[in-house]
Image: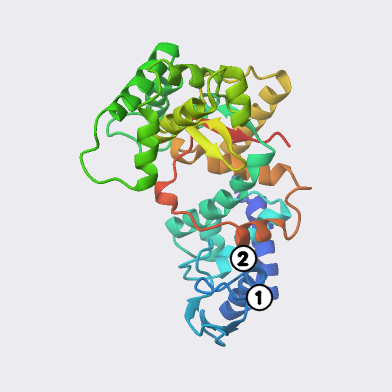
Amino acid sequence: MKAQHERPKVDSHFLIVAAEVNFVDRMYPTEQACFSEIWRRIRQNKRCQFCGSARLKVRFGKRTGNCGKCGKKFWLTAGTIFERMRSARPYLVAIHLLEKGIPFSARTLSRVCNIAYETASQIFKKIMNAVSVAMSGTAILVSSFEFNSLICKRSLETDARRHPVTEQEDAREVQRQDASSIEKIIEERTGGFNQPAPGPVCEEKSSQIDAAEQVAPSTPELIYELLSKEPQSMDQLIAASGLEPGVVVATVSILELADIATRLSGNRVVLSAELSSASLPQLDSQVRGSINQAIWFIRKFFHGVSRKYVQIYLAAYWCFIDRARWSEGKVFKQCCQTARVEMKTFVSPLELRFCTA
């Protein structure tokens, strides 16, 4: 008896993605229709980069326009994630799949849109970076070492002849800085203020250096101990330190010039991001379960990532699970509001933003 031939396996998930692509093609049958839809979304907040006017005149069939006030030429997608795009259709397909909650990888996007994998990868990362910008208000900070099991792909940051996960081991030294090393950093960064500048300096920086020379050597350590990740007003620092207001202001200027403190609006001060990673709170069982679910999700649809782009794929996980936040039109709106970022220079931080829902 002849053996029955097995039927070829059907990728049902790919068929679902292809069906949604056909829907996008029916909605926007031409490349000009795709670009017109993107411009319609961008137009709501678009202003002339030269005079700030909203009186923009678009050339029919072109990607450029003229300002109705100053008359200067501008590119329609300049300053957005759509800048320098060659084809608008893959962007619409990717955004539509995200808003429908259908997971897809850059490989899948390249197949359904008939584009190069590198192009699809860049489109995916640009859109996911726009989503990750919205995580700052709702996410919790999680150590990147929680996702070591995902790191199996190389990037431009990976050293030759070393496993990609060794990037985490190199970053561990920065995360384990203790009080003594912090004092050493402060001493190294502030020791040069008592020496004359080798050349001409601006008036503002010169006044800050003059004020810094009047600060006692132990004062920067005292102010540093009072700083935290939560913003504090200058009055709070003055009351907590018991020092004169002028001394506190001069000390904050020292720490700010040394990239140790950051001054925010409203005369508030916060510890810089580089030195704020002394320790993270212990994760509870619910967050731990969400992390395991995110690891399973990324393995299933992306088969592992590089450490350079871990934050991008955590944003993708959030976009797919939080359907209330990323319903129809929300991803497109976020993409139009997010400024263009060069993804080649993007590197995931040591402390990743993670949303559980």
Residue drawn 45% across the image and 27% down it:
251
**Please, what is the three-letter code of the amino acid marked with disc 2?**
Leu
In the picture, residue 204 is in which quadrant? top left
Q: Nearer the viewer, residue 277 or 39?
A: 277
**Please, what is the three-letter code of the amino acid marked with disc 1?**
Tyr
Secondary structure under the numbered disc 1 in the rendered image: loop
Q: In the shown orientation, is residue 329 left or right of residue 180?
A: right
Vertical placement of 238 versus 7: above or below? Answer: above
- Residue that carries the numbered disc 1 in the rendered image: 28
Q: Position of residue 89 (x, y in %)?
A: 57, 69
Vertical placement of 163 versus 51: above or below? Answer: above
What is the distance, in whole Å, between disc 2 and disc 1 at their CAs? Answer: 9 Å
Residue drawn 42% across the image and 33% down it:
259
Vertical placement of 113 versus 193: above or below? Answer: below
Tell me the quarter of the image containing the C terminus. Answer: top right
Residue drawn 50% across the image and 68% down it:
78
Q: Nearer the viewer, residue 41 or 313?
A: 41
Dots 2, 1 in contact, CB < 8 A: yes
Tell me the quarter of the image containing the N terminus. Answer: top right
